[in-house]
Image (cartoon, helix red, strand yellow):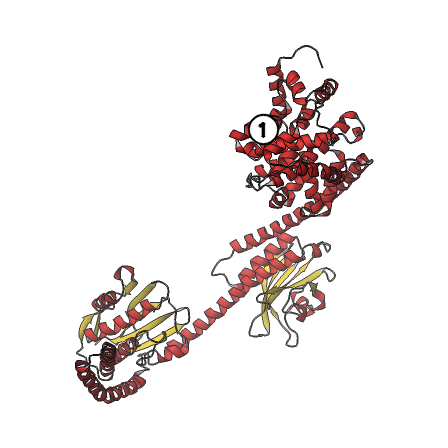
Amino acid sequence: MSDKPPDCPTVARQVELAASQLNSLSILPSCAARVYSELLQAQAVSAVLAEVIESDPALAAKVLSLIHQQGLSFTDENLVLRRMLDKLAPEVLRDSLLSVNVLQPFDHDKPEAQLIKEVVRHSFAVACAAKEIAAIVSHQKHPHLVYIAGLLHDMGKLALYEVMPKSFLSIVEEAKSTESHACTIERKHLGLDHTILGKRLALKWGFPDQVALAVWLHHSSTDVISQTMPQAKIAQCVQLADSVARQCGIGQSGSYDEPGPADETARSLGIAWEQLEQIRRDLPATVRHKSEVLGLDSQNAAADYCSALHSTAAQLARDNTKLSLENRSLHSTASHFHFIEDFLSGINANATPIKIAYDFAVRWQKFYQTGTVCLYLVVPTRAPWLEAVLVEPASGSRTVVLHVPGEIPPVPEPIASSFAIVDAHDYLDWLFEQLDVPFDSKHTRLMPLLANEKAIGAIAFELRYPGDIELFREQFRTVTSIGGSILSMALAQQRQQLIAEQLAEAVTGLEDTRPQPGTEGSLSALAEMAGGAAHELNNPLSVIAGRAQLLAKAETDPEKQRALRQIREKIRDISTIIEGLVSFAAPPQPRPERVKIEQTIDEAMKSVGKRHDPEHLEVQIEIDKPVEHVYVDPGQIVSALANILSNAVESYTDELGPVKVVASAAESAEFVKLTVTDFGCGMDAETVQKATHPFFSAKPAGRKRGMGLAHAARLIQTNKGSLHIASEPDSGTTVTIYLPRK
């Protein structure tokens, strides 16, 4: 080092700029060997790896910086490094640790390497002593935070060695020859010392504030500073621990002056002399353990490092190969999904099953570059024929009809209900004979087209590259299952269309299309029963009501008066029920007149609006132009229709939903057809059968009396109309009403 006085501000700035480029501190080869070995052996953070990180200042600094970069929260009061490691994703921690620089492994016998070893040993000695001191100090409740501060207190020295190793060694030599403190020599030649540099890095790397403060102040007058800055107590603990470690001669701090008086600082912290002596006695054993963890005294540090590095490189190579294979597999899978996407996007909603099968077979041959392809569909009725698609690369594609021998199942048993790839020539001689196309017997494979674990067809194809069959097995399974599901839906739609056509033909052949009121007989019987019940109930109720009224006038006891009032209220309820029965049993004779169907619906809607919030009613009304009038009693039909609409509105259990009302011409010119459709809770078959019975209700007990649909059916019947209900649970209900035109 030059004897010429340096330009301290300039040098200090140069040192700071050089240190600001550091992303981490370098670690010793022995430490690197331990880290690499543990990373190879475990997916998660092992206890050994955690202890290595907790013992080495460079690794601890790297992890704290990583925690900050990842945006993970830690507080000054609860910094337990081992717990923080669990918050990091294993792969993120692994990559970060592998990126840490390693000091030259073959220079471990050089003086500078020995010096760095002793600085590291001194660092964890201070950390261990600081933790014990913090555990004793009554107002300091977080020894883990003090431990980290002690471990990193000399990180500025390690940074100086990183950016200017020769100058750092010269500073140490001068401090030793003059028996000076390291900070004094550092400020003399650099214009700053390791405490300032350490603080700068602590702030850059996002360390907790109290750790940065301890790194900065541990060589200052902490006794004085802590009186006005309580958070400096941590720096005071670290300062005392530094004195203890130096007095014990553990490690190398780079300072050669006499350690400061520990007793005075101990008294300031409230630590007794005996407690401090116990820490001094225990510290060497603790340090020996930490040294073993880091392998500081290993005689084979370079060899261990090289071996661990070789193993790590080999493992990373294997991982890279595995990732490469997975990437190829993913690329292959992605291309298969492109095939599926292309197939699905080309489907027309009105396409026939054989047209969809044709598109699938053509795409299959083109995508997989196979030879001839034959895809056939199975007719559910076990007809002696089936439709097939034949794709020949040289001759084009066509659809054919094939005969199926009665004793042979179209889809072989091994693939009838589960996916498998079989040799086609073991099962499809009957098919190949009819096609008269030369399929390669050795390389033709057969796979099912499955839907709900049942084959609806199969695909036979020549495989030009037999080695690919196992590579593509799972992709074949996926593609054929999707094709089978689509074809199954198309076949189902085709069957439904056939049934609809047959039904339309049958309906066309009916001679009498006039709607028949199927519930007329049962409603009449129920009406007769209701009338008799009303007559039998009226007389005893009148007697009970009269007696209750007389007793109430003479009674003075409040409880008995309340009971008598309840009796009279219930009698009124029963009277209302009887009125409903009478109305059902003997409704007024209708007075029919010619009324507009639109006006009838509007008046029914107004009545429903009085029972429900009209702003939330969602009723869609459609009236065909030819339908204008019906010949009914307007009041009775409005009442009936209002009850039906109200039931539709109430079918939505959680919230109101749409109700659709359609008026159209009936099959018979004598009637108008009116449908009320909701999409609510629906009814099962038994409920539909009883829905027009008086007092029947599917609602829980106590919820209305179930007379709405009964009244509606009765009134429509008396007006020479009919009412029919169609419903399914969770699918809604449609009430169809036929009303006479004249």
x%, y% of residue 505?
A: 41, 75
Local secondary structure at mark 1? helix
x%, y% of residue 243?
A: 67, 30
Which of the image's four quarters has the N terminus?
top right
Viewed as shown, does residue 26 lie left or right of 698? right
Task: In this rendered view, identify the residue nearer to me: 263 or 735.
Answer: 263
| In the image, residue 48 above or below residue 379 | above
- Please state which amino acid type lies under the numbered disc 1: Thr
| In the image, residue 249 above or below residue 676 | above
Task: In this rendered view, identify the residue nearer to me: 729 or 148.
Answer: 148
Q: Residue at x 37, y 75 (%)?
A: 698
Which of the image's four quarters has the C terminus?
bottom left
Residue at label 1? 222
Q: Residue at x 71, y 36 (%)?
A: 280
x%, y% of residue 48?
A: 71, 45
Q: How many marks?
A: 1
Residue 721 visible in the displayed image:
no
Task: Determine crowd level at label 1: few under 14, some 14-19, many 20+ residues with C-alpha closer than 10 A.
Answer: many
| In the image, residue 395 above or below residue 740 | above
